[in-house]
Image (cartoon, grey):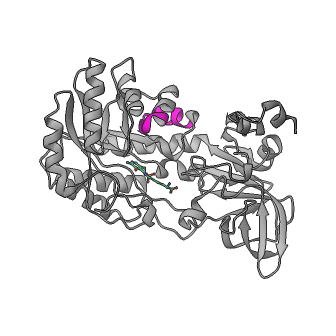
Amino acid sequence: PETARLDADGRLLVGGCAVADIVAEHGSPAYIVDEEALRRTVRRYVSAFRDRHPRSHVLFAAKSFPAASVIGITADEGCGTDAVAGGELRLALAAGADPARAVLNGNAKTDDDILVALRAGDGRGVRYIVIDNLDDVERIARLAAELDRDPVPVLLRVSPSLQAHTHEALATGHDASKFGIPSAQVEDAIRAIRAERLVDLRGLHAHVGSQLLDLDQFDAEAAALAEFERFGVYDLGGGLGVRYVPGDEAPTIEEYAERIVRAVHRHLGDDVELLVEPGRSMIARNVVTAYRVVTVKRGMRTHVAVDGGMGDNLEVALYGQPFAPAVIDRSGPAEIVDIVGKHCESGDYLARDVRVPRPEVGDLVVIPVTGAYCYTMSNNFNTNLRPPVLLARDGRTRVAVRRETFEDLVRREQIVSQEALLGV
Ligand code: LLP
């Protein structure tokens, strides 16, 4: 992808830094963000929408890579923020995100989540809270009254009755979805919201699914929203898919913006405020993960086991997402291998049947297009430590999130003494 280049000696560079040097300094595994490429993607996104529809806001879906510095970069380059629940919102605000350009989503918001949104920006609150159920309405009205607030601007999340063409777990806009209000109940929900003096309904929200490669689905989404009365604000969620492996095809950001804006103009009006919430398509291709080969087992298959796996990338185990790993800085005869992780589960694959120069212990494996949902769903299975997030730019690397330590992991243990835990 655009993120990785070879230098004159054939060494792999990200952000002008040799991956081998980054790993030598910071260890492996590591998420490496190509900062300049990310900034470029954000600027492209913002202008793709602004150029076609001046009243638009591109909100980075923080869930896709919730590191404060990454959210900060998106804010710096003109993006707002889509946060799910109070934690992401707090992180985004700490990173310098503008509450006036932030939206709070979530299908089960607690009082605490809503309070973060109402208190943001010295009490001015976020731009919109997205209502996902009628309990949200009651909670927002009650908390706004307790805080003696003006009516709280909200959008209503509608389930647009669309079956997205994507993995089942990534489809969110169908009738059986846990997200949003089913279309048949939307009119009642609108009435219920309007009955609350302290909740101010400004528009509708929808999100069809993630990793969508067929732009027709965004036309269908806008058309589905046109079934209801007209509003001044529409938030069409995220969902644009990306290319993961050579041969995949994905629409460009500009093609996506063009289709969305055209569909909105046709179905909803050309003077509305338009919001979109891309996550994957903003970050995925601007990050690589680097691993070191720990062991190679040649039998029925060749298993190349690396020092990470489903602890830092659940996309393969959960959704069967293909990736195209490279064994870097090595040449020679090729071999078809499976890249597996170090976790105690047979589903712990990073890629199957990949053709790479015959790997040896100690080699570096780099997996491109690992920006979306890998860091955010990283975990401590087998008491494994989560990798650092490194920002590479102009030949320099900065640590955005340091590598997790054993001390980090046991800090919450209360019954066995810290002394004992740290003494081993
Ligand atoms: N807005 C809403 C309301 C969403 O639910 C999502 C994603 C987005 C925006 C951002 O969508 P994107 O542009 O990234 O497709 N854990 C899964 C991804 C779940 C995405 C859920 N919602 C994964 O690892 O692939």
- State the quadrant of the N terminus: bottom right
Q: Position of residue 261 (x, y in %)?
A: 27, 50
Q: In this view, does 264 lie to the left or right of 392?
A: left
Residue 337 visible in image = yes
Q: Position of residue 9 (x, y in %)?
A: 81, 55
Q: Does the magenta stretch include residue 279?
A: no
Q: In this view, does 306 lie to the left or right of 238?
A: right
Task: Say how many tags the image has.
Answer: 0
Which quarter of the picture shows residue 159? bottom left
Give the magenta range: 70-87
From the viewer's side, name the closer residue of 287 and 344. Answer: 344
From the viewer's side, name the closer residue of 314 and 365. Answer: 314
Q: In this view, does 146 lie to the left or right of 197?
A: right
From the viewer's side, name the closer residue of 67 and 248. Answer: 67
Compared to residue 228, the image places residue 113 above or below, namely above
Q: Where is residue 189 in the image (x, y as percent from the top left)?
A: 18, 45
Compared to residue 184, the image places residue 199 above or below, namely above
Compared to residue 298, the image places residue 151 above or below, namely above
- State the quadrant of the C terminus: top right
Residue drawn 60% across the image and 54% down it: 370
Q: Does the magenta stretch include residue 86?
A: yes
